[in-house]
Image: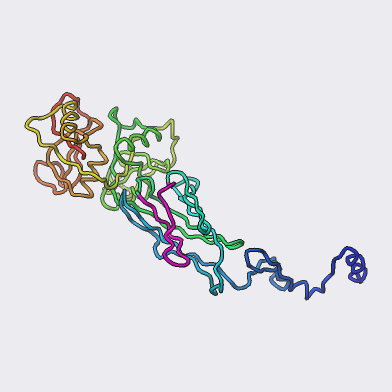
Amino acid sequence: MLGGLLRPLLAACGLVLLPAAAAAAVRFNYNNGFYYHDVSNGNGNGEIYFNGVRLFVESPQASVSATRGSSVTLPCHFHYEPELSAPRRTRVKWSWLPANAVGEPVMVAMGNRHRSYGGFRGRVRLRRSAPGDLSLVINELRLNDTGRYRCEVIDGLEDESITVELELRGVVFPYYSDKGRYRLNFLGAQQACQDQDAALATFEQLFTAWDEGLDWCNAGWLADGTVQYPITAPRDGCGGSDLAPGLRSYGQRHRLLHRFDAFCFSASIKGSVYFLASPTKLNFTEALQACAENSSHIAKVGQLYAAWRLTGLDRCDAGWLADGSVRYPITKARVNCGPPEPGVRSFGFPPRHQKFGVYCYR
């Protein structure tokens, strides 16, 4: 009845009222090539059904490990099921997802056009070794490149993504200011690590270090703004002897007002660290000059840790470092070289007129 009254009016406007069965079969064609329609005989929730073609995005590796300064490929592949008879124009967006922070764009590409962003500009490209290959190649890896990366493939209404974790091989070490313990706010901790050729460690990096035996009873900043410390041997004063081993957490702290130490992460270095042979011991000023005269620079704490952990540097001689601390690296523990475990031994920050050896970096 209503349809009979409406048809003349709609016809005058150039419109046609379709029967319900015909209306249910109407398909809307969007310029991305996908057809879809709201199926009236579905479950009543108005779901959108595609015409049987589905976009899949996959990665054969959930995580990739690499060394600082090298190149790495983060795998990402896409395909359609069923396969399409003709290629389609898809867009890919790679993003970096640092801990507890908004994702940052790395690269966006469509066809032969692409754009990279921020510190990744000029260092990234798509591999494109085969159809559907959108793997991201990052050159000249930096300390802060570690973290999760999202590969998002967009084809009109279709949008699928995967994440790949990028890990840098390196070492976590605790660090405190020459002014004493618990003197660093978050920004100061960031700067302190950077000054030692390192970066604030992530939670994952500290967890790995704890799993490998790091035990340190002083709380330090991490890259996500939390304050934590690793305990392998529970004891009083370090969270209590009745708690299980693990990471003790203070949670998020005020990044300007609260002060702690820092946990830094150092990765492989391009040069080498060595103990400078000298006929006499040196004060700090003399140590700086001695390295310069040997065509080197005085080594930083992060460089010494990286050389100890990644190249096996072992020397039972205390030496000056660039921050005014005195340390020495031991990979094979022995009598008169400190505790029975491998590690970097520290004398703290002695007066700079005292005499020691020196570690140089070239």
Between 147 and 272, the one lying in front of the other is 272
99 versus 130 height, above or below: above
Placement of the C terminus among the 4 image quadrants? top left
Residue at (8%, 30%) from the top-left corner?
A: 280
Task: Please state if 116 lies on the left or on the right of 362 as rendered.
Answer: right
Residue nearer the viewer, 81 or 302:
81
- Residue 275 is one of the magenta-drawn residues: no
Picture quarter containing residue 357?
top left
Left or right for 106, reference 353: right
Question: Residue 262, located in which quarter of the rendered image?
Answer: top left
Residue 128, magenta (yes or no)? yes
Does 315 sit above or below residue 60? above
Q: Is residue 321 above or below residue 169?
A: above
In this view, the residue farthest toward the left is 279
Quadrant containing the N terminus in the rendered view: bottom right
| Residue 136 at x, y percent in the picture | 42, 57
Total marks in image? 0
What span is colored magenta in the figure?
120-139
Furthest toward the top, the residue is 353
Query: In the image, 340: left or right of 176?
Result: left
The secondary structure making up most of the magenta span is: loop
Q: Residue at x 48, y 47 (%)?
A: 104
Camera-nearest residue between 248 and 191 = 191
Locate residue 264, reporting x and y percent.
Answer: 32, 41
The image's colour scheme reads rainbow
Picture coordinates of residue 176, whole percent (x, y): 30, 34
Residue 134: % across, % down: 46, 61
